[in-house]
Image: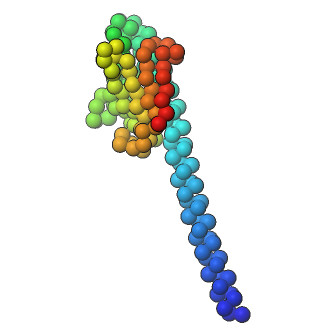
């Protein structure tokens, strides 16, 4: 009888341990997905604000007179850039890096989950000031 009880206790301990590990793995996976979704929402907001900046006249602080998105950085949009670069912004979930590609100075917004050296999840390419001039590339 004691052997059966010992076997049952051992089996229960192993089962509880395995279920605990499974739960932790699912929680971690869920957290990564939530971070990706939060980064996507923030990227939509940033893309909209970049296009709004492009539509705003230069005398009002916008970039209407500039070629493409030349000269834009996160400070001009009201965001606090990182110490690394005025074109890098980081919040709790993700890092956003803004680059301008020549010759048209299209804007590219790269989104990384887990910091600026984390998982590259999205690239938003803006070629103009309207939603139709936006390309979303998921990685």
Relative image position of residue 133 (x, y in whole percent): 48, 15
Give the residue at the far right of this rendering: 1
Q: Is residue 19 above or below residue 110?
A: below
Determine whether, in the image, residue 76 is placed left or right of residue 23.
left
Relative image position of residue 5 (x, y in whole percent): 68, 87
In the rendered image, is residue 61 in sight? Answer: no
The answer to which quarter of the image holds residue 119 is top left
Of the pair 61 and 49, the residue shown nearer to us: 49
Of the pair 49 and 109, the residue shown nearer to us: 109
Residue for point 42% across, 9% down: 56
Of the pair 91 and 94, the residue shown nearer to us: 94
Q: Is residue 46 above or below residue 28?
A: above
Give the residue at the far bottom of this rendering: 1
Residue for point 64% across, 78% down: 11
The answer to which quarter of the image holds residue 81 is top left
In the rendered image, is residue 30 in sight? Answer: yes
Relative image position of residue 49 (x, y in whole percent): 45, 20
Residue for point 65% across, 82% down: 9
Residue for point 34% across, 16% down: 105
What is the basis of the colouring in this image?
rainbow
């Amino acid at each position: 009888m004691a052997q059966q009880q010992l076997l049952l206790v051992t089996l229960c301990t192993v089962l509880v341990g395995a279920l605990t590990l499974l739960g932790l793995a699912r929680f971690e996976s869920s957290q990564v997905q939530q971070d990706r979704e939060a980064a996507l929402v923030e990227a939509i907001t940033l893309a909209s604000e970049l296009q709004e900046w492009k539509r705003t006249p230069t005398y009002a602080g916008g970039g209407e007179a500039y070629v493409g998105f030349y000269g834009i950085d996160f400070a001009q949009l009201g965001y606090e850039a990182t110490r690394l670069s005025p074109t890098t912004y980081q919040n709790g979930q993700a890092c956003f890096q803004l680059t301008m590609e020549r010759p048209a100075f299209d804007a590219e917004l790269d989104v990384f989950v887990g910091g600026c050296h984390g998982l590259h999840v999205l690239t938003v390419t803006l070629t103009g000031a309207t939603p139709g001039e936006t390309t979303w590339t998921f990685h």
